Image: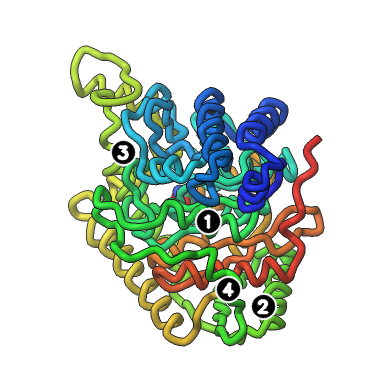
Amino acid sequence: MIHQPIHTLADAYRRGDLTPTAVAEAYLARIDALDRRVRAYLTIVREQALAAARESERRWRAGTPRGPLDGAPIALKDVLCTRGVRTTAGSKILDTFVPPYDATVVERLRAAGAVILGKTNLDEFAMGSSTEHSGFHPTRNPWDLTRVPGGSSGGSAAAVAAGMAAGGFGTDTGGSIRQPAAFCGVVGMKPTYGRVSRYGVVALASSLDQVGPFAQDVTDAAHLLGAVAGHDRRDATSIPAPVPDYAAELAKGVAGLTLGLPDEYFIDGMDPDVERAVRAAIEVLKGLGARVESVSLPTTRHALAAYYVILPAEASSNLARYDGVKFGLRVSAHDLVGMESRTRAAGFGAEVKRRIMLGTYALSAGYYDAYYGKAQSVRTLVRREFAAAFARVDLIVAPTTPNVAFKLGEKEDPLSMYLNDVFTIPGNLSGITGVSVPCGFSVSGLPIGLQILGRPLDEARVLRAAYAYEQATSWRGRRPDLP
Ligand code: GLN
């Protein structure tokens, strides 16, 4: 039952071959056995999970399941607020924060019958690409425990890859779902900005943040997305558009679709194994009847720089609320300013402080136009280039990352870490949707991800192409060997 996709679990529940309680117990036992080494979780909610599983079991027995996610064991990145369960955002400053409410995503998952196993590790406040910069401990890649799982949602990606959750959720602000999905050999999807509610999600950069699923296969990704997508009046940026039945569209194939291949996404210095695997994947899609054209996205090389002005600017403003007054850590002092500065000095890690300072600087009088204003202009160009490309092609295919999972401690200077996101960040700046689907392995046996990007709200077509590719290949059956 471990490593069984959620849709097949639901079939087994229906037939009575498995029960949600037995499956939840098996997952909890596997977490007990493995997570000392992988360290994907920050908090495990054993009793809650078992109680939810028993409820689910009653519904399956009575023939009244709530849908394909009923009884599915799920891991949640620890930025999604969970009522009564500690939510840390990977930061010491929120070490003891217990939200009084559920994020909309969590509320919808519970309503769909999902069994939440626990909260997963991340780079502090989702700033990072390796999950090494968690305020608690690093997470390791299940394919090679000396390597990173990617980030910032590395805990959820590693949990799904290692069979410590059947599916998971993360957030993608600059690639934090797609990149760890690629590094861990699972499916990871960033929905269109506004497709999934951000209510109850600890904010990093509000104009970029988006919640999305990690899954063992594309069918599960479709179900997981379908359960949480849709308008929420508590998030003013949530899009009031109907949610298609993503799973029902999967089998439509790619024949007749035009795929764009961006020249700028094959760069000097990228891992030749990645390039080879992605080019082979494109041949597979051609063989399935897709047409491939090259497209140009020339502003790609400036997107990273623009992101690293816009993100710190928004983060510096969002993180101003952690001042020791309302939630989390408080380090006392003789006066208010002393208390605030001591709390922030003790509670935030180095990367978070770096970005708060960069963002505050970029927004300060005299620098605002030169940095923030300029970055916003670049963002507009990126958006226009995607719009122009999508006027000609249906989807864009590219590598998810320029390389495979790197060693813990390998990327010490921030810039080399930031460069890992060159292929994912433009998708966030433009607000479009994209998925990373496994497309092979490096010579050293590490997973590689194929990125498929689509027009705003075109998740169904993105998933359908990913599904066509997945069904034509055999990567999805491969799981890490973790005795
Ligand atoms: N790695 C990127 C960053 O450090 C993206 C993070 C994210 O998507 N949350 O900002």
Please report whichever mark, 2 or 3, sits nearer to the chain's N-terminal start.
2
Residue in the picture at 50% in, 40% down:
76
Can you tell which quarter of the image residue 147 is in? top right
Q: Give the foreground label among 4 and 3.
A: 4
Whole-angstrom CA distance, mark 1 to mark 2, is 23 Å
Which residue position is annotated with label 1? 223
| Numbered badge on residue 285 | 2
Q: Give the foreground label among 4 and 1.
A: 1
Please report whichever mark, 1 or 3, sits nearer to the chain's N-terminal start.
1
Please report whichever mark, 4 or 1, sits nearer to the chain's N-terminal start.
1
Q: CB of mark 2 within 8 Å of CB of mark 3?
A: no
Residue toward you, 381 or 189? 189
Residue toward you, 67 or 28? 67
Whole-angstrom CA distance, mark 1 to mark 3, is 33 Å
Whole-angstrom CA distance, mark 4 to mark 2, is 10 Å
Disc 3 marks a residue whose amino acid type is Leu
**Residue 474 percent across, percent down from the top left:** 76, 63
Q: Element at badge 1?
A: helix
Residue in the picture at 31% in, 28% down:
100
How packed mark 4 is, by other alpha carbons closer than 10 Å (few <14, some 14-19, many 20 or more), is many
Disc 1 marks a residue whose amino acid type is His
Disc 4 marks a residue whose amino acid type is Val
Q: Give the foreground label among 1 and 2.
A: 1
Q: Element at badge 4?
A: strand
Please report whichever mark, 4 or 2, sits nearer to the chain's N-terminal start.
2
Whole-angstrom CA distance, mark 4 to mark 1, is 23 Å
**Residue 479 percent across, percent down from the top left:** 75, 49
Which residue position is annotated with label 3? 319
Q: CB of mark 4 within 8 Å of CB of mark 3?
A: no
